[in-house]
Image: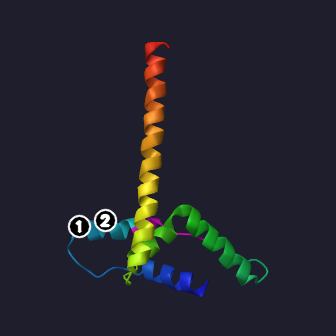
Amino acid sequence: MNLIAKQASNFFRAPGLTCNPLNLMHQQFQQWRGIRVRVRNGNLEQSLVIMQRKMQSSGMERLIKRQQTHHVKNSEKRVLARKALERRIRSQALARKLQAILVKKVRGL
């Protein structure tokens, strides 16, 4: 839990001052993003669980993981590539099925 909180605090840290307009736009976008969790009855563990759940559902956890710059093993790269391929094939198959349904509907079959 502490690791996620530490990464989240690094994620919200203001980026270096540069004149890059994309960086400024990114900084403005970061100001709008945020998760608030109330600590009730001093139960910090429950609050952290709720915060982690909210981060996962909002997609912020993926953004934090994407920013990490650590070495990815070749075996891990292969697994990720295989999963991405399977996802792409599934979405293409679904698109083909939907297109066939729409064509039948348009033709009145």
Tell which of 18 and 100 is nearer to you.
100
The relative height of residue 19 versus residue 97 in the rendered view (above or below) is below
The rendered magenta stretch, by its main secondary structure, is classed as loop
Q: Amino acid at mark 2?
A: Met
Which residues, given as a range, are shown in magenta?
Answer: 30-37
Q: Position of residue 19 (x, y in %)?
A: 20, 74
Q: Would you say residue 101 is visible in this rendering? A: yes
Query: Which quarter of the figure has residue 84?
Result: bottom left
Q: Position of residue 5 (x, y in %)?
A: 55, 82
Instruction: Bin the neighbour count of mark 2 within 10 Å (Cα to Cα): few under 14, some 14-19, many 20 and up.
Output: few
Tell which of 93 and 30 is nearer to you.
93
Q: Residue at x 63, y 68 (%)?
A: 53
Q: Give the Cα separation between the discs numbered 2 and 1.
A: 6 Å
Q: Which residue is mark 1?
A: 21
Q: Secondary structure at mark 1?
A: helix
Query: Which quarter of the figure has residue 12?
Result: bottom left
The relative height of residue 89 versus residue 65 in the rendered view (above or below) is above
Q: Which residue is mark 2?
A: 25
- In magenta segment, residue 33: yes
The answer to whether the residue labelled 2 contacts the one labelled 1, judged by CB atoms less than 8 Å apart, is yes
- In magenta segment, residue 5: no
Q: Position of residue 48 (x, y in %)?
A: 66, 78
The relative height of residue 101 versus residue 6 in the rendered view (above or below) is above
Q: Position of residue 47 (x, y in %)?
A: 69, 77
Q: Amino acid at mark 1?
A: Pro
Left or right: where 19 falls relative to 43: left
The relative height of residue 97 versus residue 29 in the rendered view (above or below) is above
